Image (spheres, helix red, strand yellow):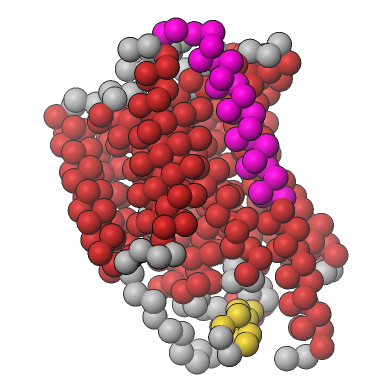
Amino acid sequence: MTMSESTLQRTDQRIHELMGALLRTGVVLAASLVFAGGVLYLARHRVPVTNYHVFQGEPAEYRTISGIFHQALALRGQGLIQLGLLVLIATPIARVAFSVFAFLYERDWTYVVVTLIVLGLLFYSLLGSHT
Amino acid sequence: MGTLEFTLIVWLGGLLAGFLGALTGLGGGVIIVPLLALVLGVDIHYAIGAALVSVIATSSGAAAAYVKEGYSNLRVGMFLEIATTLGALLGAVLVLYLRAPTIAIIFGVVLIYSAYASLTQTHHEVKEQSPDRIATWLRMDSSYPTPHGFEPYHVRGVPLGFALMFVAGVLSGLLGIGSGAVKVLAMDKAMKLPFKVSTTTSNFMIGVTAAAGAGIYLSRGYIDPGLAMPVMLGVLGGSLIGAKILVEAKVRVLRMVFSAVIAFLAIQMIYSGITGRL
């Protein structure tokens, strides 16, 4: 193993550790928001709001990012749950975004491009309009 | 049924699904969907939406625990994520055009394959392999920690692995599952990665693949807060308990028992799909 390879190994190791911390934080934050939202939701609704036997789709305020933020800031249980789920979806995306910097740091241009493609696809999924 | 009763039942179902998912290595997603659809009569689109977010939670939670150990291959994972995210986007769009019974039948078939794959999984040791042109160009060759220090390995079969990963992505976006079984197949069999590297890299990728599908699901209104809340909290909790028990339990026997349970669920899904009960 050459010197540069062993340096690469160590950088990889550090990147892995930071990523682990990022993922853990995201999951804990998401679960806390979902739990808090769940308590509010259960306190306010005696019967489920949705009829789960027939698929109708969520109303706009729980489908769009701006709608979710609006509902969460108004401390509506469902809004807080959706915000938690949004944080959860954003966690792997943040991991990919972080990888862009990690590969930039290693001057690995091929993988900077590869990672940017993945990031672009993820942003398209989350921010594009799919209705 | 009142909100509290419904939420508690779904939460317990999620707990069980997460627990079984961790023990069998199949993930909670493939178990919670049949539970919701068959037992509680939840429309399969809602069930899939709730399952997909719980897949992100368990995968990110598990990945956080594994990345430290240095088994996962970041380059292999990132390159293959192009295939899985593209596939997941396609799968999430396909859901719109497929009727519930069709989805149930596809789900059942994938479930049977996953249970079979988890039973026949062998921890093969990699033998000395010659380097591969594409893998070398993509700088995928790496090393992983073993009891005798870092062991270098070569990666092979990149095009086939990429194609299989695309399929895994479609299934993930279509069925709300992690498709761990297909991912491990791609990296284990096609790309000849060492077992520990393929399982941890797969875990690492599942969250990204699921996030690609979940973005579309959210904006389409497939993710219902009242259902996703107990599913996500249950599956996450169950998988954490399962991972703890996994360390001590006799995995082989447990896998046999639970694979039988899962095969039964799969047949129920296919039957309900064919008879149009879903």
Instruction: Quarter of the image for the C terminus of chain B: give it.
Output: top left
Q: Residue at x 18, y 38 (%)?
A: B268
User: Start and end of the magenta stretch?
Assistant: A22-47
* Figure check: A131 above or below A102: above
Q: Is residue B216 visible?
A: yes
When asked about the image quadrant of residue A7, the answer is bottom right
* Residue A27 painted magenta: yes
Magenta stretch encompasses residue B133: no
* Residue depicted at x 41% and y 39%: B15
The reply, left or right, for residue A119 in relation to residue B2 is: right
Residue B250, quarter of picture? bottom left
x and y, in percent, of residue B27 in the image: 42, 50
Q: Number of labelled discs?
A: 0
The residue located at (38%, 28%) in the rendering is B10
Report if residue B48 is visible in the image.
no
Q: Which quadrant would the N terminus of chain B be assigned to in this image?
A: top left
**Residue A42 percent coordinates (x, y):** 51, 15
Residue pictured at 58% horizontal, 50% vertical: B61
In-front residue for pair B250/A108: B250
Judged left or right of residue B275, residue B31 is right
Q: Looking at the image, is A57 positioned above or below residue B208?
A: above
Q: Is residue A12 left or right of residue B145?
A: right
Depicted B31 relative to depicted A96: above or below = above
Report x, y in % for residue B251.
33, 65
Instruction: Decide whether the magenta segment is chiefly helix, strand or loop.
Output: helix
Rendering coords of residue A38 (x, y %): 55, 22
The correct choice, above or below, for A29 with respect to A131 in the image is below
- Viewer-side residue, B60 vs B2: B2
